[in-house]
Image (tube, rainbow, N blue to C red):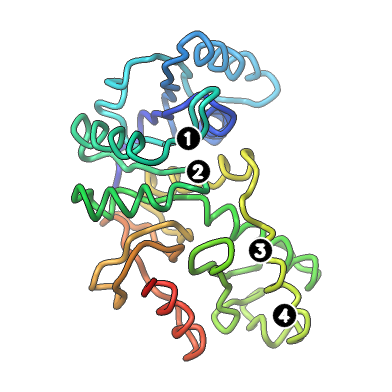
Amino acid sequence: MFPVSHVVVLGAGELGSAAARALAAAGGVRRVTLVDDAVDVARGKALDIRQAGAVEPADAEVGATGDLAAVVGAAAVVLGDRHGRGEWAGDEGLMLLGRVRALNPRALVVCAGPAQLTLVERAVAEHGADRRRLVGSAPEAARAGAIALLCLEAGCAPRDVSLALLGRPPADAFVPWADASIAGRRVEDVVSPPALSRLDARLARLWPAGPTALAAAACRVVRLALSGGPGTACLFAVPDHESGLAGPGAALPVPFAPAGLRVAMPTLTARDRVRLDRVLAR
C-alpha cells in the first residue's frame, strides 16, 4: 500500500492542471504539487485551484514549484503535459522518468497522457524501471467512454457495468465482451450482437480522450493505489511472465491490492486471446 500524503503532478499544461484539480477535489490526498519550468504559470494554476475551493471543495493543500526535487517523499507522481510544450515523451520524457526514479524509487508513477505508452515500455525495457510502479492511465479514460456507450445502448447505469479494454489504442484496442457484465448478467445476454458490433466500430473514436477525462482516469488510479484497492483499472502496463503474457506494453487490466499492482487477465475467448497475442507480438 502506498502511503497517503503527497502527490506530485509533473507539468502545468492543460492535462497536468486538470489532474491537479481532480486530485485536490477527490479526497484522500493531503498535498498536491504542480511542477513546471514555467513556475509563474504553475503557481497561477495552483492558486486557481485553491480559489475554486468554494465551488469545488478541496481538502488538499495545492502548491507549485519548478524544482523536480518536490517528488522526494511523494506517494505518487503523475506525468502530465508541460505548459506550452505538450506531453512528456521521447528521450526527454525517458530522462525525466530516470530522474524521478533516482529521487524517489518507491513512488507510483502514473503517465496520464494518451501518447505515453512508448515511454512506459522504454523505461521498463531500457532502464529497468519497476513495472509494478510505472503505468499509463489513458486506457482507463477510454474504458469509461466504452462504458458510457454501452449504457446508452443498454439503458443501464455505469455503476452496473463491468468491462475491460485491452490492446493498443486506437486501432488495436478491443473489449472482450464475453467477460463483460451488466448488473451481474453477461453483456452478450443483454445486448444484441449487431449492437456490440456497432460499439466495437466506435471504440477507436474514443481515443484520445480529452484532458478532463484523462485527468479523472489518472486521479482514479492514484486513489486506488493510495488506498490499496480493492479495484481494477485498465492501464498501459508491461506484463511479466507471471501474468501469462509476454511482449511489449498494452492496455491491460491491473488490480489494486495492499500488496501492490500486478497485471491480471480476464477470461478470454480463443478469438480474443489470439487478438491480444497478436497485439503483444508486434
Q: Position of residue 70 (x, y in %)?
A: 31, 21
Residue 168 horizontal/vertical position (percent): 49, 64
Cβ atoms under marks 4 and 2 closer than 8 Å: no
Q: Secondary structure at mark 1?
A: loop
Q: Helix or strand or loop: what does disc 2 sit on?
A: loop
Mark 4 vs mark 3: in front: 4
Of labels 1 and 3, earlier in sequence is: 1
Report the amino acid beneath label 3. Answer: Ala
Residue to which mark 3 is pinned: 146
Q: Look at mark 4 in the image and give the residue it sits on.
A: 197
Q: How far apart are the alpha carbons under marks 4 and 2?
A: 28 Å
The secondary structure type at the circle numbered 3 is helix
Q: Which mark is residue 113?
A: 2
Crowding at dot 4, Cα within 10 Å, few <14 / some 14-19 / many 20+, comes out as few
Q: Earlier in the sequence, mark 1 or mark 2?
A: 1
Amino acid of disc 2: Gly
Depth check, front residue: 107 or 203: 203
Viewer-closest of 260 and 137:
137
Q: Quadrant of the C terminus?
A: bottom left
Residue underneath mark 1: 80
Q: Kindly report the distance in space between the C-alpha atoms of the residues bearing marks 1 and 2.
A: 6 Å
Q: Quadrant of residue 121?
A: bottom left
State yes or no: discs 1 and 2 in contact (Cβ < 8 Å). yes
Across the whole image, how many numbered discs are drawn on residues? Answer: 4
Q: Is residue 78 above or below residue 61?
A: below
Q: Looking at the image, do the residues carrying marks 4 and 1 touch, with CB atoms under 8 Å apart?
A: no
Residue 34, percent from left and from top: 45, 22
Query: Compared with residue 266, is residue 80 higher up or lower down, i.e. above or below?
Result: above
How many residues crowd mark 1 within 10 Å: few (<14), some (14–19), many (20+)?
many
